[in-house]
Image (spheres, rainbow, N blue to C red):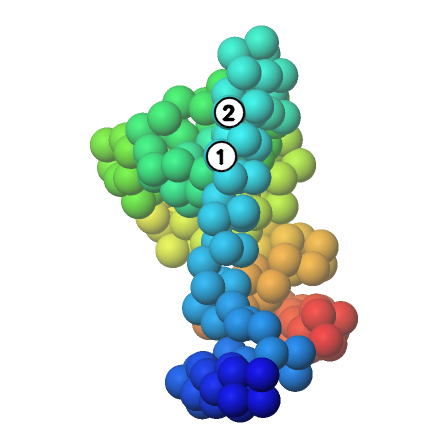
């Protein structure tokens, strides 16, 4: 009996030695590696996004335009499935047609970049202006930038400056940065202070 116990002990010691220290753990059980844990999390996240995408697709078909916007975002970013810029453009258009500035801004971005739709700076600028008129601050910033630089239409330094400054005042950091890059200042401009405050609030 003693001999058997000694042999069993030797086997257990040998098995423990063959495992990496990180895998043995304090209880003697095999732990999963960081790579395995990361893969498991990625699979879980993808499953959730895939489900969200399918749900958004169903709701969008029923003309729930918030769902159409969410679906367009997922399709543009390639989350929960393959990236589909053409489909994203169509769904952004549905949202824009429903008078939601986020859809107009999303479609404008794809139109200016020529992603999923044919590139058209004039149409992109028009869509950004539509987004701005509907209260979407990112649309105001982008339209202001295009107007100031004369992209996609006639140059409008005054109008572009005003749009950028208003977007900056609403804490849209990119607008504050563009004001400084373009030199779109007026005597009362406070874009630098606003930008610092935005960065401070992030931290």
Q: Which residue is drawn at 45% across and 38% down?
A: 80
Q: Residue at x 34, y 48 (%)?
A: 151
On screen, residue 12 above or below 108:
below
Q: Is mark 2 on a helix, strand or loop?
A: helix
Per the image, the residue denoted by label 2 is: 54
Q: Residue at x 50, y 55 (%)?
A: 40
Query: Could you say which is closer to the camera, residue 11 or residue 102?
Result: 11
Q: Is mark 1 on a helix, strand or loop?
A: helix
Query: Could you say which is closer to the camera, residue 23 or residue 140?
Result: 23
Residue 190 seen in this snapshot: no
Per the image, the residue denoted by label 1 is: 50
> Percent from the top left, x then y, of residue 148?
44, 54
Q: Which residue is drawn at 63% across and 26% down?
A: 66
On screen, residue 181 above or below 78:
below
Q: Are dots 2 and 1 in contact, CB under 8 Å? A: yes
Q: 10 Å neighbourhood of mark 2: few (<14), some, or many (≥20)?
A: some
Numbered mark located on residue 150 in the image: none
């Amino acid at each position: 009996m003693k001999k058997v116990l000694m042999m069993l002990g030797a086997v257990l010691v040998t098995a423990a030695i063959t495992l990496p220290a990180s895998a043995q753990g304090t209880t003697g059980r095999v732990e999963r590696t960081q790579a395995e844990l990361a893969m498991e999390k990625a699979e879980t996240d993808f499953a959730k996004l895939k489900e969200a995408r399918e749900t958004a697709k169903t709701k969008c078909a029923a003309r729930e335009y918030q769902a159409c916007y969410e679906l367009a975002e997922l399709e543009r970013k390639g989350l929960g499935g393959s990236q589909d810029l053409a489909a994203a453009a169509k769904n952004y258009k549905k949202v824009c047609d429903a008078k939601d500035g986020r859809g107009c801004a999303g479609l404008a971005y794809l139109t200016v970049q020529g992603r999923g739709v044919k590139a058209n700076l004039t149409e992109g600028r028009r869509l950004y202006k539509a987004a701005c008129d509907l209260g979407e601050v990112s649309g105001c910033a982008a339209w202001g930038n295009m107007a100031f630089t004369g992209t996609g239409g006639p140059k409008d330094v005054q109008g572009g400056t005003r749009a950028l400054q208003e977007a900056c005042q609403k804490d849209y950091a990119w607008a504050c940065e563009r004001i400084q890059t373009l030199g779109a200042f007026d005597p009362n401009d406070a874009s630098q202070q606003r930008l610092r405050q935005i960065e401070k609030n992030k931290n």
